[in-house]
Image (cartoon, helix red, strand yellow):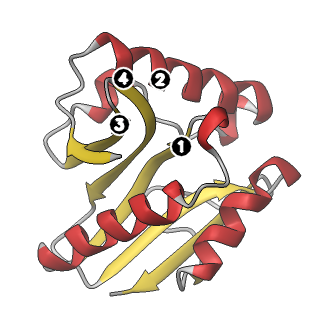
Amino acid sequence: MQIIVDDLTGPEIAEFLTAHVAELRAISPPESTHALDLDALRRPEITFWSMRDGDAVVACGALKALDAEHAELKSMRVAPTHQNRGLASRLLEHITASARQRGFSRLSLETGSFGFFEPARRLYAKHGFTRCEPFADYRPDPNSVFLTKRL
């Protein structure tokens, strides 16, 4: 498995992200779906990584700079065929280390409150994230859980 900064131009990552956004839109109400599509992930304040097994994309995640000290974790996904292998932890550790190297002192995220998102919430708790109030442009939402971690 290899983690690379992805320029988001390949058909493999486009297909992977299209499935990610479609899955989240099928689960969460539109006003509570905060997944970024391919174009939104290409913004200069976002660094995007894919984890690959050969040419196949098996996981992804992004880091969005909110300000000089605070960044947001976005678009974490592991392919259903590769779940429960420790890939999400490995990718999360990689992104967290990158956030530290860039001088961020806080890393936050939004995830869903539904049962579908329970494995993600357990992963984040295992890595030291705790609940917080909405941050950046988020507003209180019963369908969202906001988490943060000091780096």
Q: Alpha carbon of mark 3 to alpha carbon of mark 4: how far?
A: 10 Å
Image check: 117 left or right of 41?
Answer: right
Query: Are there few (<14), some (14-19), or many (20+) residues within 10 Å of tag 2?
Result: some
- Give the labeled residue for mark 1: 77
For badge 3, the amino acid type reads: Arg
**Are circles 3 and 2 on residues that touch, CB within 8 Å?**
no
Q: Alpha carbon of mark 4 to alpha carbon of mark 2: how far?
A: 5 Å
**Are circles 2 and 1 on residues that touch, CB within 8 Å?**
yes
- Give the labeled residue for mark 2: 16
- Work out whether residue 25 or residue 122 is closer to the camera in this orientation and state it: 122
- Give the labeled residue for mark 4: 13
Kind of element beneath mark 3: strand
Kind of element beneath mark 4: helix
For badge 4, the amino acid type reads: Ile
Q: Alpha carbon of mark 2 to alpha carbon of mark 1: how far?
A: 9 Å
- Give the labeled residue for mark 3: 52
Q: Which mark is residue 138?
A: none
